[in-house]
Image (spheres, rainbow, N blue to C red):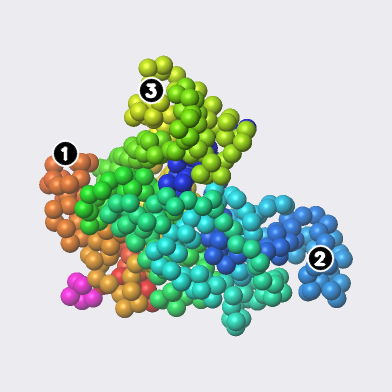
């Protein structure tokens, strides 16, 4: 059974694949890393065999060399205990099920063909390949260890038994994916920011142990995905000169421990910036759909009355949707416009379609669910309004992705968060920033709020071991 949300997502995918679908809460960090790796280094049968080994009752162990002379493998109770241990190690977030799943990838042969990432993983891989060619070799080196230096890698090596992935996961081809050739200066800036962040996590400037580096990569990929979902609909539709991602949509982010006091002016400003970001996503989707419908190519012999359906089917074909499935999707899309005066393809027609497929409340719920999984948006649904924050594990990942090995001055770090991701945690080096934010009654109040938040953020970095303060008051963001 199809849904209008998925139908419209397919219309938008050939231009912007970073649009959420009808189950935005499904993709998790493990899924996205798995999809990213499956597209870059490939997947094979061993990954699905490991999934079965972890979750299926009465699983056949004959394909695993380690069980050949193991007496315990024939004892049901011992085998169940072994499976429980594997789940604890390779599926700590419960993303592996009896017939599918995305285990923690400690080796490239553990990748699976799991579509639970909604295609985001391969598209992040495509963005990386377009912006920074050659990262596949770095990912392969990370996921194919030569030396065994930790117990988790040793377990993974035993499970995969030197098998090699044979296939690479792909996505429908499209020359219009915005990340292949950014159509605007803001989209080029966004692509560069995301790619360089992920590249830094692959290069591991801080020399983290391999399992920790993979964990940071998984968290960083997912954070980058949420940021891209929030900003790309706007970025690809505004062709103005900008120097910072926050100029698209400023995301006021709590510097203290999230979720913060719901009644504090700064927390309320963060909530307002989340709602504004969602409104920007909706506007961006409308502009993208208007452009897509205008550019749709259909035979010149198509009857006038059949043009709307023909154009929709043409766009759906670009996303790999054809035949009866495409016809049903086109019908659902046209039926979503209930106002008879709305002419096909106009801004008003598109606005009504997007209102049906991606209403603000549903978008907010989906992106909130995604952001919560990585510690970027809180609190849990039903516990207050959504706001931006950085939980400590995510903060550690961001430091690794933005800070060079020698460290960086604190205010420069605050500027990098704003420039690269649109996160506003304080004025940093921009004294004019307060006057540009519409969340307080005056620039003076905004300036005071931002300075207070920045100081809370500085103290938190120091307490977390991610910054050090010197006797002269200089604060350096780093990681020992």
Q: What is the C-alpha distance between the residues marked 2 and 3?
A: 61 Å
Give the vertical position of 350 relative to 95 (above or below).
above
In which quadrant is the C terminus drawn? bottom left
In the rendered view, does 102 fall on the left or right side of 180? Answer: right
Image coordinates of residue 94 in percent, x first then y, are: 62, 53
Of residues 69 and 72, the one nearer the viewer is 69
Determine the image quadrant of residue 164: bottom right
- Which residue does the image show at 72% across and 52% down from the upper left? 98
Task: Tally the numbered discs.
Answer: 3
Closer mark to the observer between disc 3 and disc 1: 3
Q: Which residue is mark 3?
A: 343
420 sits left or right of 209 in the view: left
Q: Quadrant of the N terminus?
A: top right
| Magenta region includes residue 257 | no
- Which mark is on residue 61? 2
- Location of residue 372 in the rendering, given as x and y in whole percent from the top left corner: 46, 49
Task: Name the residue that disc number 1 marks.
Answer: 441
User: Where residue 419 is drawn, which disc sits there?
Assistant: none
Q: Residue at x 57, y 40 (%)?
A: 321
Magenta stretch? Answer: 470-474
- Which circle's residue, 3 or 1, is located before the other in the chain? 3
Helix or strand or loop: what does disc 1 sit on? loop
The answer to whether residue 427 shows anywhere in this view is yes
Q: Please report contact status of discs 1 and 2: CB closer than 8 Å, yes or no.
A: no
Residue 300, percent from left and from top = 45, 32
Which residue is at the front of the view, 92 or 264? 92
Q: Secondary structure at mark 2?
A: loop
Residue at point 50%, 23% (across, down): 335
Residue 15: x %, y % from top left? 42, 46
Q: Does label 2 or label 3 sit earlier along the sequence? A: 2
Q: Quadrant of residue 415?
A: bottom left
Identity of the residue furthest to the bottom in this view: 147
């Amino acid at each position: 059974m199809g849904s209008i949300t998925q139908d419209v997502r397919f219309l938008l995918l050939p231009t912007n694949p970073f649009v959420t679908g009808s189950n935005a809460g499904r993709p998790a960090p493990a899924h996205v890393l798995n999809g990213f790796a499956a597209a870059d280094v490939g997947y094979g049968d061993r990954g699905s065999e490991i999934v079965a080994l972890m979750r299926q009752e009465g699983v056949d162990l004959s394909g695993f060399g380690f069980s050949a002379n193991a007496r315990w493998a024939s004892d049901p109770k011992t085998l169940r205990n072994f499976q429980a241990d594997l789940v604890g190690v390779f599926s700590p977030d419960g993303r592996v099920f009896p017939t599918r799943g995305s285990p923690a990838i400690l080796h490239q042969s553990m990748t699976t063909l799991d579509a639970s990432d909604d295609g985001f993983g391969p598209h992040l891989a495509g963005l990386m390949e377009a912006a920074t060619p050659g990262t596949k070799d770095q990912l392969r080196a990370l996921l194919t260890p030569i030396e065994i230096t930790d117990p988790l890698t040793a377990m993974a090596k035993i499970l995969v038994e030197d098998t090699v992935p044979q296939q690479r996961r792909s996505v429908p081809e499209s020359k219009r994916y915005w990340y292949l050739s950014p159509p605007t200066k803001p989209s080029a800036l966004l692509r560069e920011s995301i790619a360089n962040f992920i590249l830094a996590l692959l290069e591991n400037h801080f020399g983290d142990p391999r399992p920790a580096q993979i964990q940071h990569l998984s968290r960083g990929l997912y954070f980058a995905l949420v940021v891209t979902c929030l900003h790309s609909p706007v970025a690809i539709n505004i062709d103005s000169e900008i120097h910072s991602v926050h100029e698209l949509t400023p995301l006021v982010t709590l510097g203290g421990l999230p979720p913060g006091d719901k009644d504090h002016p700064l927390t309320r400003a963060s909530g307002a910036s989340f709602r504004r970001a969602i409104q920007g996503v909706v506007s961006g989707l409308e502009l993208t759909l208007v452009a897509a419908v205008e550019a749709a190519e259909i035979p010149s012999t198509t009857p006038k009355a059949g043009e709307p359906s023909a154009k929709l089917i043409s766009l759906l074909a670009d996303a790999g949707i054809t035949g009866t499935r495409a016809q049903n999707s086109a019908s659902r899309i046209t039926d979503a416009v209930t106002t008879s005066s709305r002419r096909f393809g106009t801004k008003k027609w598109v606005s009504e379609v997007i209102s049906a497929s991606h209403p603000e409340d549903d978008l907010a719920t989906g992106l909130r669910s995604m952001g919560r999984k990585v510690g970027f948006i809180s609190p849990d649904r039903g516990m207050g309004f959504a706001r931006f924050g950085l939980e400590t594990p995510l903060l550690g990942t961001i430091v690794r992705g933005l800070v060079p090995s020698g460290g960086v001055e604190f205010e420069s770090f605050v500027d990098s968060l704003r420039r690269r991701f649109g996160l506003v945690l304080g004025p940093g080096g921009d004294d004019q920033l307060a006057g540009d934010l519409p969340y307080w009654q005056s620039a003076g109040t905004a300036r005071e709020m931002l300075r207070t938040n920045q100081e809370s953020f500085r103290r938190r970095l120091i307490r977390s071991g991610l910054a050090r303060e010197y006797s002269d008051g200089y604060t350096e963001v780093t990681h020992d």
